[in-house]
């Protein structure tokens, strides 16, 4: 191959005799120019074809030599294929979708990118509301025509107005999606997380109905009845509002590393839907009651599998994921 390249340069290169002839065509007698030009181009084409044929021949020879050197035993067993593994978060989401579908809930998906109105205004958090400071928001450049600035959804409550306006009560719905918050991470908090948003509307619903739904969900996730407690808290879109804790299933309330010695694990925020949220969606005030709750899927996975640090779920460690 090296010798062939030397011949190509010698006969077709920039300094070859044939190239000199082609460059000098302009100086040749016009009567002789066509004949000399045709002869020169024919010579060039013949040389190029001869070299190309030889290159192809030598390449085949090289491949033959390589194949003769590489001994391949076709009787050897194949290498085992390594397949992927279902992530514990995916398992929990899939199980919950099936569970709530069987319970008659409509299933929604939220968008990662939402707008100021759906994320805040429609759920009773107007522009001048001090509660906006409760959410460490990732704002995105640009804005919608009628719904304000763009942002990454801070909670799955951004779909509440859509669900309320698209359906006629009574109804039960569940939305799944990712949430994004500009906050520091630790063993129980992440800046990016999954949530499922329960929204139930009917006549004469109470906190007792809410607590029963939450206890049933916890029992489905961990396979045993789990005690939950409701601590009064403030969320603009519910009244009354609660922080909901689940008793640690690993130590049964005695205190361990998983629950940080507290005996309880903070799970979610919940409450009775604020009547202003109903009004914003076009309902008459006090015509309907409802409750809503937003559960962190990671917290449910931690409760189900006894994981004591939420960061393990996003570390990308294959050996961790394969345990579940």
Image (spheres, rainbow, N blue to C red):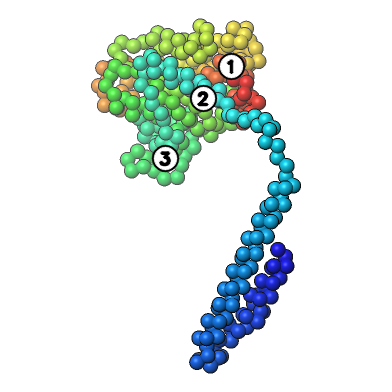
Q: At numbered mark 1, what does the secondary structure look like: helix, strand or loop? A: helix
Q: Nearer the viewer, mark 1 or mark 2?
A: 2
Q: Is residue 162 left or right of residue 65?
A: left
**Residue drawn at 62 percent across, 83 percent down:** 20
Q: Is residue 303 above or below residue 85?
A: above
Against 27, is 267 above or below? above
Of labels 2 and 3, earlier in sequence is: 2
Name the residue tied to disc 3. Answer: 150
State yes or no: discs 1 and 2 in contact (Cβ < 8 Å): no
The numbered mark, 1 or 2, whose residue comes first in the sequence reads: 2
Q: Which residue is mark 1?
A: 305
Q: Residues within 10 Å of mark 3 (few under 14, many from 20)?
A: some
Frontmost of labels 2 and 3 is 2
Name the spot of residue 41 as percent of width and height, x first. 55, 78
Quadrant including the N terminus? bottom right
Q: Which residue is mark 2?
A: 90
Residue 219 seen in the figure: yes
Circles 2 and 3 in contact, beta carbons < 8 Å: no
Q: Answer above or below: position of 211 versus 53.
A: above
């Amino acid at each position: 191959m090296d010798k062939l390249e030397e011949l190509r340069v010698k006969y077709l290169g920039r300094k070859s005799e044939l190239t000199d002839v082609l460059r000098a065509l302009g100086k040749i007698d016009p009567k002789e120019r066509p004949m000399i030009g045709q002869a020169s181009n024919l010579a060039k084409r013949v040389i190029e074809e001869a070299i190309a044929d030889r290159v192809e021949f030598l390449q085949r020879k090289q491949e033959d030599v390589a194949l003769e050197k590489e001994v391949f035993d076709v009787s050897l067993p194949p290498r085992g294929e390594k397949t992927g593994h279902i992530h514990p978060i995916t398992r929990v989401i899939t199980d919950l979708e099936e569970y709530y579908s069987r319970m008659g809930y409509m299933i929604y998906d939220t968008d990662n990118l939402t707008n100021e109105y759906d994320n805040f205004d429609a759920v009773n958090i107007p522009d001048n509301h001090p509660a906006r400071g409760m959410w460490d928001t990732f704002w995105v450049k640009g804005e919608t025509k009628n719904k304000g600035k763009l942002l990454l959804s801070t909670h799955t409550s951004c779909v509440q107005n859509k669900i309320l306006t698209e359906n006629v009560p009574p109804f039960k719905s569940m939305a799944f999606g990712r949430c994004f918050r500009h906050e520091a991470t630790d063993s129980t908090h992440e800046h990016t997380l999954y949530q499922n948003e329960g929204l139930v509307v009917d006549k004469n619903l109470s906190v007792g109905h809410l607590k029963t739904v939450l206890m049933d969900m916890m029992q489905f996730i961990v396979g045993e009845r789990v005690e939950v407690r409701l601590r009064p808290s403030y969320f603009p879109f519910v009244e009354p509002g609660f922080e909901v804790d689940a008793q640690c299933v690993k130590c049964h309330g005695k205190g361990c590393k998983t629950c940080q010695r507290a005996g309880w694990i903070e799970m979610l925020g919940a409450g009775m839907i604020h009547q202003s949220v109903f009004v914003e969606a076009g309902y008459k005030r006090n015509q309907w009651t409802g409750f809503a709750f937003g559960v962190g899927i990671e917290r449910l996975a931690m409760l189900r599998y006894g994981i004591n640090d939420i960061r393990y779920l996003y570390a990308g460690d294959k050996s961790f994921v394969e345990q579940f």
